[in-house]
Image: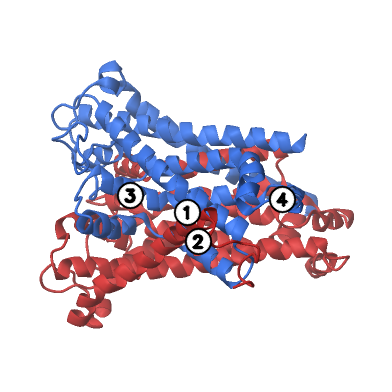
Chain colours: A blue, B red
């Protein structure tokens, strides 16, 4: 076989695998929209839940947003603080390596383990039981490495001479952070939070037995009440629903959930592409 | 201390104290999690001993054995890797070596969205489509099998492996490609003969990180794996239902909360899962960072960086 022919064949093989890889996303979207669009209407989006899987998903969506925002608010200071500590105060060396290793490990922990141990720590020890606060705590710990990594990378991407100038002016670490680091990495910080929120909104395993119920409540009124979420709503329906209408409702809820997650990720993509355009010009 | 930290740092300053505290919280939580897993699983180890790893039954109240779950986890993730590897590496190579920058960022954005698809939606897709197809194609009574779970996982880790492998490929310095081009090699010869061998550690790292992610995946697997806590018979028949560690934890954690040995057995399975995932992910991370760092050093070295590629070219032709 001649070399040019071989080159052309390999190129087509690689191209088709890339097309197949990307079309997976299209397939998923088509499947979700195809099955879910019939369920979507005003009553479904803004109605209260009825008997098993019937009625609307307004409170489920509200619950997902509540857990997501709670986790975002809690993890923001932790992620930002530790990103600043790592970039501005730690020096390259054993401590920095150990810290990085621990952050990598935290990022790799299977989410179900956050559920198990988080429930022991927050639910049992803090005595808040199966409640939305437990869920918020667990999700906050779970997303903090994601948020921290994106924040750290955007801080590290600040040109070295900005930092050097600030040092040469004799600024203290706090002054440097306020004058240089935060303004220069602001977009990156927002991106980190958005990706963290997207991760929290799509998570099921960590909250399914620690924060949520399927029915019996609309929206938590105290700290220790559980919450309805889209994720666990779909989970229960996927396991138990047989009625076609109920199944369609599960897909409708899935469509709303994927909408929330994709909105957050797309927003972060837009911010980042604008950022790289600025860097190029 | 001054070797570890910036010597100008004033430790009494509230800014330093506060960020230090958040750093301790963030990094301490994984240590705490690990300690909790160990402490809470001690009772089952003292009750069952090595039986916990070698037995074959999980009957709450009688005996607990993690071996079928470990087998299920490894089989499912291993198979998923086999399905996804050609596709993920093919698209990574095409995106990194052939696509113009604009299309490249489109593919990367697609992969990022794909990575964000909630696990529960994969589960729903698995229940409604994949399980039914597997049932029809293989003529099974029940479509919820180890095989079904492995197909689903393959789709879930595709974006992780693809995007990380693509980064590793991009990290190979451009001089290598230019020299190879100047020697008259075709694009595919450059891709497979120069870039891929150079980026191999990083690509292996990407695959390991994908594997680590697949191993910890819970809800999607839980819905389609079948939930049977024993080894398939014969052991290689993956068209039978099985169980993986996360799926077991997801199914039984709620009912076993604080209920003696059953709970301890679940936590101990969690510990086994934690150790497997940690080893895989940390080795993967190390390879990935090493690969990226190596190529950066090569590119900055004077002339020296060009030698390996020339050797590879000579060896290949």
Q: Is residue A120 above or below residue B129?
A: below
Label 1: few (<14), some (14–19) or many (≥20) C-alpha neighbours in 10 Å: many
Q: Answer whether labels 3 and 2 touch (C-beta < 8 Å).
A: no
Look at the image and tell me whether residue A222 can be seen: yes
Residue A108 image point, x, y percent: 45, 59
Q: Which residue is mark 3?
A: A137
Residue assigned mark 1: A145
In depth, the one of B188 and B215 nearer the eye is B215
Image position of A204 with respect to A112: above or below: above
Camera-side residue: B158 or B21? Answer: B21
Picture coordinates of residue B151, whole percent (x, y): 40, 51
Mark closer to the observer (1, 3): 3
Closer-to-camera residue (B172/B293): B293
The secondary element bearing badge 2 is classed as: helix
- Specify the quadrant that holds the C terminus of chain A: top right
The mark found on residue A104 in the picture is 2
Q: Secondary structure at mark 4?
A: helix
Where is mark 4, residue-wise? A163
Is B138 on the left-hand or right-hand side of B142? right
């Amino acid at each position: 076989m001649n070399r040019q022919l071989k080159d052309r064949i390999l190129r087509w093989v690689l191209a088709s695998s890339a097309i197949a890889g990307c079309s997976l996303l299209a397939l998923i979207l088509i499947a979700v929209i195809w099955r879910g669009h019939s369920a979507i209407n005003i009553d479904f989006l803004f109605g209260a839940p009825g008997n098993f899987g019937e009625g609307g998903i307004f409170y489920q969506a509200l619950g997902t947003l509540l857990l997501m925002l709670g986790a975002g608010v809690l993890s923001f200071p932790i992620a930002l603080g530790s990103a600043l500590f790592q970039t501005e105060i730690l020096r390259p060396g054993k401590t920095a390596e150990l810290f990085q290793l621990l952050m990598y490990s935290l990022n790799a922990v299977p989410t179900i383990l956050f559920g198990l141990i988080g429930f022991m720590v927050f639910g049992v020890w803090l005595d808040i039981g199966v409640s939305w606060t437990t869920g918020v705590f667990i999700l906050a710990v779970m997303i903090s490495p994601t948020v921290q990594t994106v924040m750290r990378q955007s801080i590290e991407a600040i040109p070295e001479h900005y930092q050097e100038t600030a040092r040469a002016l004799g600024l203290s670490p706090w002054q440097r952070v306020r004058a240089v680091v935060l303004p220069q990495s602001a977009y990156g910080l927002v991106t980190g939070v958005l990706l963290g929120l997207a991760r929290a909104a799509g998570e099921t395993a960590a909250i399914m037995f620690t924060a949520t119920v399927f029915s019996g409540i609309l929206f938590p009124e105290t700290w220790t009440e559980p919450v309805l979420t889209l994720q666990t709503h779909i989970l229960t329906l996927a396991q138990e629903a047989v009625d076609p209408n109920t199944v369609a409702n599960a897909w409708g809820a899935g469509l709303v959930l994927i909408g929330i997650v994709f909105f957050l990720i797309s927003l972060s993509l837009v911010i980042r592409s604008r950022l790289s355009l600025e860097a190029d010009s | 201390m001054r070797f570890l930290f910036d010597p100008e740092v004033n430790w009494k300053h509230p800014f330093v104290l506060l960020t230090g505290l958040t750093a301790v919280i963030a990094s301490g939580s994984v240590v705490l999690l690990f300690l909790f897993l160990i402490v809470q699983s001690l009772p089952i180890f003292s009750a069952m001993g090595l039986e916990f790893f070698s037995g074959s039954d999980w009957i709450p109240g009688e005996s607990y054995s993690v071996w079928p779950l470990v087998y299920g986890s490894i089989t499912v993730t291993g198979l998923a890797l086999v399905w996804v590897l050609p596709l993920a590496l093919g698209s990574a190579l095409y995106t990194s070596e052939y696509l113009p920058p604009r299309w490249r960022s489109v593919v990367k954005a697609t992969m990022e969205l794909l990575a964000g698809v909630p696990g529960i939606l994969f589960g729903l897709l698995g229940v409604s489509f994949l399980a039914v197809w597997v049932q029809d194609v293989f003529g099974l009574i029940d479509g919820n099998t180890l095989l079904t779970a492995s197909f689903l996982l393959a789709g879930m880790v595709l974006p992780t492996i693809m995007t990380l492998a693509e980064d590793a490929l991009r990290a190979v310095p451009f001089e290598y490609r230019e020299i190879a081009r100047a020697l008259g090699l075709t694009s595919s010869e450059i891709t497979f003969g120069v870039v891929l061998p150079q980026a191999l550690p990083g690509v292996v790292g990407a695959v390991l990180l994908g594997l680590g992610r697949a191993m910890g995946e819970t809800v999607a697997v839980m819905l389609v794996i079948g939930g049977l806590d024993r080894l398939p018979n014969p052991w290689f028949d993956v068209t039978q239902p099985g169980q993986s560690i996360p799926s077991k934890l997801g199914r039984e954690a709620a009912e076993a909360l604080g209920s003696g040995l059953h709970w301890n057995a679940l936590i101990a399975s969690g510990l086994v899962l934690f150790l497997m995932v940690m080893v895989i992910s940390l080795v993967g991370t190390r390879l990935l960072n090493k690969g990226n760092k190596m190529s950066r050093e090569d590119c900055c070295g004077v002339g020296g960086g060009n030698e390996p590629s020339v050797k590879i070219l000579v060896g290949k032709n």
